[in-house]
């Protein structure tokens, strides 16, 4: 976070918001604060996944889909998602960012995922008020997002219980899922 905060101060919040939108994030990003680097904007999981998918895909912004293919009982294809992407960032520059993001797993808050025994890049996230926790990670072929938040009956954000905050439970969920995937 420290390195990216410093970078944000040098390139400006406006530029960071532009890059995020180029990556495919459609939600509102406050382009007046350097804290946007830390993810202070209330973006949807879909939006954040879209942005990271562009990074994981070597700078090619993919069109996300939830269902890749549907087949009937006779194994006949009924639907296949259109696979399309646009190259929006320089692949070599994105590779440097991907390399930096492996540190989260190698020596950082997502070290639990090292047990997968393969290259993984990612980013853990928390809310300062402990109302959310997340991990977005990717291998060279698969990106997965896990996010936990606690919503009150009135829609307000409540503190996520400590047992999920401690040891980045989202990283544990990611690791268990990726072992099967």
Image (tube, grey):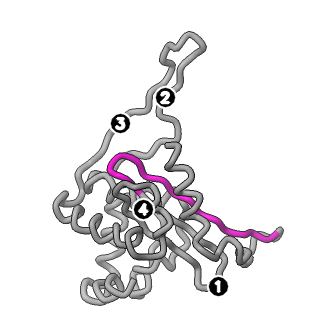
Residue at 31%, 89% (x, y): give it: 6
Q: Residue furthest right?
A: 153
Circle 4 residue: 25
Circle 1 residue: 129
Circle 3 residue: 83
Find out whether residue 65 is within the magenta segment: no
Who comes first in sequence, dot 4 or dot 1? 4
- Under circle 1, the secondary element is loop
Q: Quadrant of residue 97?
A: bottom left
67 left or right, relative to 143: right
Q: Residue furthest top?
A: 74
Rounded to the nearest whole Å, what is the CA distance between mark 1 and mark 2?
A: 40 Å
Rounded to the nearest whole Å, what is the CA distance between mark 3 and mark 2?
A: 11 Å
Which region is colored magenta? 138-152
Which percent across, then down, holds residue 170?
58, 64
Residue at 33%, 80% (x, y): give it: 14
Q: Is the residue 118 above or below the residue 83 in the image?
A: below
């Amino acid at each position: 976070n420290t390195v990216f905060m410093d970078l944000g101060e040098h390139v400006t919040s406006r530029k960071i918001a532009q890059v995020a939108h180029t990556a495919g994030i459609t939600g509102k990003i406050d382009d007046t604060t350097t804290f946007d680097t830390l993810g202070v904007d209330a973006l949807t999981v879909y939006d954040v996944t879209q942005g990271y998918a562009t990074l994981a895909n070597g700078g090619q912004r993919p069109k996300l889909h939830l269902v890749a293919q549907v087949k009937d009982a006779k194994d006949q294809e009924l639907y296949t998602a259109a696979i399309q992407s646009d190259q929006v960032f320089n692949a070599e520059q994105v590779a440097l960012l991907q390399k930096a993001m492996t540190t989260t797993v190698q020596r950082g808050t997502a070290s639990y995922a090292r047990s997968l025994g393969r290259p993984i890049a990612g980013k853990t996230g928390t809310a300062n008020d402990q109302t959310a926790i997340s991990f977005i990670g990717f291998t060279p072929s698969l990106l997965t997002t896990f996010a936990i938040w606690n919503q009150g009956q009135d829609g307000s954000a409540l503190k996520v219980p400590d047992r999920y905050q401690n040891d980045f439970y989202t990283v544990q969920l990611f690791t268990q899922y990726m072992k099967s995937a």
